[in-house]
Image (cartoon, rainbow, N blue to C red):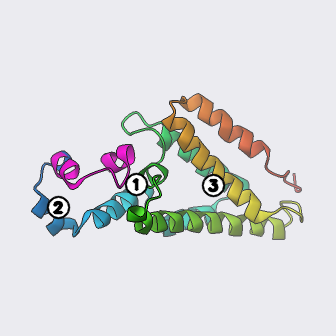
Amino acid sequence: MHLFWRHGYETTSISDLTAAMGITPPSLYTAFGDKRRLFLEAVRRYAGEPEAAEAAIADAPSAHDAAQTLLTGAVEMFTGADTPPGCLLASATASGSAASQDVQAVVAAYRRRITDALTARIERDVAAGVLPRGADAGALAGLVVAVIQGLSVLARDGAPRTALAGVADAALRAWPEDVTA
């Protein structure tokens, strides 16, 4: 997982992976089938099951709380002491070449699921009168996901956790006021 995170999907070779895992290429192929399936397993381990993330967003006390949890979690994950900086999902598929389109599609689908879940949670708060009637749920969810991707880039550039936390806090200040407060 760390090799994909640090070097990307395409540039991480089978020999890099087998050396890091202490196995032979035939063992890798027996266990995972191919590099793509190993990468997808690393993504699942990193991001968890999408259904769990969707449920956590849906069950959050408010859409703002869900957004705050996503942003805070990203800041912590992207600046972990034992992991490469930034986001595995963003780092591993950044090249955009034809060879990685398949895995890029999987990563993009995961991001869409998170965005859709957050959009639905925001829409619930709008319908309940917690957020203003004119709040654009899709734009707010997109803002959170875009900030998360930006936090990944900043972390890869060496920004400290405190700086990333400040960016996350600034993004949350753009959130519409709770009209029930």
Q: Which residues are magenta?
A: 1-19
Q: Which mark is residue 141?
A: none
Q: Give the number of callouts.
A: 3
Q: Position of residue 107 (x, y in %)?
A: 48, 63
On the picture, is 104 further left or further right than 64?
left
Report the residue at 47% width, 52% height from top.
94
- Which label's residue is closer to the chain start, 1 or 3? 1
Q: At which x and y percent is residue 55?
A: 56, 67
Q: Secondary structure at mark 3?
A: helix
Determine if the magenta segment contains residue 59: no
Q: Closer to the camera, 172 or 146?
A: 146
Residue at horizontal 84%, vertical 53%?
A: 178
Tell me, for residue 46, which label it has, or none. Answer: 1
- Residue 119, quarter of picture: bottom right
Q: Secondary structure at mark 1?
A: helix
Disc 3 marks a residue whose amino acid type is Val
Q: Which residue is mark 3?
A: 145
Q: Earlier in the sequence, mark 2 or mark 1?
A: 2
- The amino acid type found where label 1 is placed reads Tyr
Which residue in the structure is indicated by mark 2?
28
